């Protein structure tokens, strides 16, 4: 059936409805009223059918409630309901607009994360940290710097914290906020461990608490590394860490890891004499010289004994390739290619 014939049928339907309305206003007899109502119902049904047929193809499977709405509108509003639908709704449905111009989506490349946890017994963690450092310091795209921050989740806190502290000075708000969020996440995780271990510590006899004391000392040390240096909060956290180290040493005085941590706490507090003694004890307890040498180099620098700084750094061996030490090592070795951080 052509569109012309369909529109002609719609015109006939509206004429029938107009005739029904006219019959109601001409002093109708009861039989005329009944006939007018029947004509109006028939016109409403025919209009609903024809209106559905006139819809575009993707509207042909109109739902039942939509048909009921059209039928009710034409039934309750004689003639005007049909005209209103044809004038108000028809053109909008019949006019097939082209899709608006679509804006192309830009997919920014993200830095690939490792498929498995970093093996911290090898150099891979250090190399990964160096790559992320380069992205955070030199990438022009804030999205790349944000991706590098997310990638720090694969690093140990010892390597991740310097990167996060650098990122909180980033010029972009979104990068700074992400760095703060990641730092806050680490702080919450450490605080949760401290609460759990403190509760466990209270339920154990004193002679069995060496491991918990050592773990709490490391937790407080990590927490102290996250706050502002030399702040009252850091001083308090370092003091708590030292207390737990000393309690653990009462139970195991030959733990080299505890002596090494005590030396790092003393170095952070700038108690250089106590730090030197603790590192000497750590060495006597079997801690590798390559771990102690960088700390002794820092102590020598703070004391102004610059002649021994290079000696200590050389004793550290190739392990100083990590980003936190590379520029310092290159300086003391006389490498002219040292670049300052932006």
Image (cartoon, grey):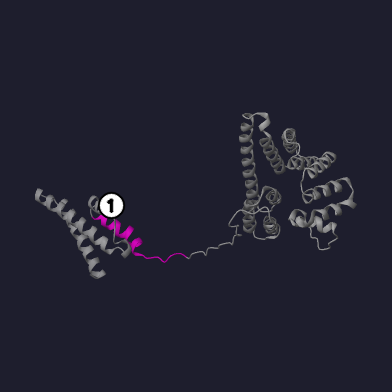
Q: Is residue 225 above or below residue 53?
A: above
In this rendered view, identify the residue nearer to me: 251 or 26.
Answer: 251
Q: Position of residue 224 (x, y in %)?
A: 71, 40
Q: Which residue is mark 1?
A: 65
Q: Is residue 169 above or below residue 105?
A: above
Number of callouts in the render? 1
State the residue at coordinates (67%, 37%): 211
Left or right of 77, for residue 291:
right
Q: Secondary structure at mark 1?
A: helix
Q: Position of residue 28 (x, y in %)?
A: 12, 50
State the residue at coordinates (25%, 51%): 72
Q: Is residue 3 visible?
A: yes
In this rendered view, identify the residue nearer to me: 32 or 27.
Answer: 32
Left or right of 314, for residue 261:
left
In this rendered view, identify the residue nearer to me: 2 or 65.
Answer: 65
Q: Position of residue 265 (x, y in %)?
A: 77, 40
Residue 116 lies within the magenta run: no
Q: Position of residue 284 (x, y in %)?
A: 80, 43
Q: Residues within 10 Å of mark 1 (few under 14, many from 20)?
A: few
Which SS does the magenta portion mostly show?
helix
In the rendered view of the protein, which quadrant contains the N terminus? bottom left
Q: Quadrant of residue 246?
A: top right
Q: Is residue 114 above or below residue 212?
A: below
Task: Specify start and end residues of the magenta stretch as a single range.
Answer: 79-100
Residue 95 lies within the magenta run: yes
In this rendered view, identify the residue nearer to me: 45 or 86.
Answer: 45
Q: Is residue 342 visible?
A: no
In the rendered view of the protein, which quadrant contains the C terminus? bottom right
State the residue at coordinates (23%, 60%): 49
């Amino acid at each position: 059936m052509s569109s012309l014939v369909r529109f002609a049928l719609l015109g006939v339907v509206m004429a029938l409805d107009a005739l029904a309305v006219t019959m109601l206003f001409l002093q109708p007899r009861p039989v005329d009223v009944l006939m007018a109502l029947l004509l109006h119902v028939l016109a409403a049904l025919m209009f609903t059918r024809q209106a559905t047929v006139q819809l575009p193809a993707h509207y042909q499977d109109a739902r039942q409630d939509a048909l009921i709405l059209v039928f009710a509108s034409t039934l309750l509003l004689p003639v005007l309901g049909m005209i209103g639908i044809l004038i108000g709704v028809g053109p909008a449905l019949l006019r097939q607009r082209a899709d608006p111009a679509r804006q192309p989506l830009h997919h920014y490349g993200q830095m690939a994360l490792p498929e498995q946890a970093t093996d911290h017994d090898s150099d891979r963690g250090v190399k990964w940290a160096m790559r992320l450092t380069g992205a955070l310091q030199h990438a022009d795209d804030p999205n790349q710097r944000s991706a590098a921050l997310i990638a720090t989740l694969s690093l140990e806190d010892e390597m991740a914290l310097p990167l996060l502290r650098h990122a909180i000075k980033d010029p972009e708000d979104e990068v700074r906020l992400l760095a703060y969020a990641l730092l806050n996440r680490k702080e919450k995780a450490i605080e949760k461990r401290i609460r759990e271990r403190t509760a466990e510590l209270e339920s154990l006899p004193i002679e069995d608490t060496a491991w918990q004391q050592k773990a709490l000392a490391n937790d407080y040390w990590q927490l102290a590394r996250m706050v502002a240096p030399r702040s009252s909060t850091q001083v308090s956290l370092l003091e708590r860490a030292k207390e737990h180290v000393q309690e653990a040493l009462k139970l195991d005085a030959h733990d080299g890891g505890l002596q090494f941590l005590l030396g790092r706490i003393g170095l952070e507090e700038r108690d250089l004499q106590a730090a030197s003694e603790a590192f000497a004890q750590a060495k006597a307890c079997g801690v590798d010289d390559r771990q102690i040498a960088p700390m002794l180099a820092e102590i020598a620098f703070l004391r102004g004994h610059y002649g021994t700084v290079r000696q200590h750094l050389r004793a550290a061996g190739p392990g100083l390739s990590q980003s936190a030490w590379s520029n310092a090592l290159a300086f003391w070795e006389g490498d002219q290619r040292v670049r300052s951080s932006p």
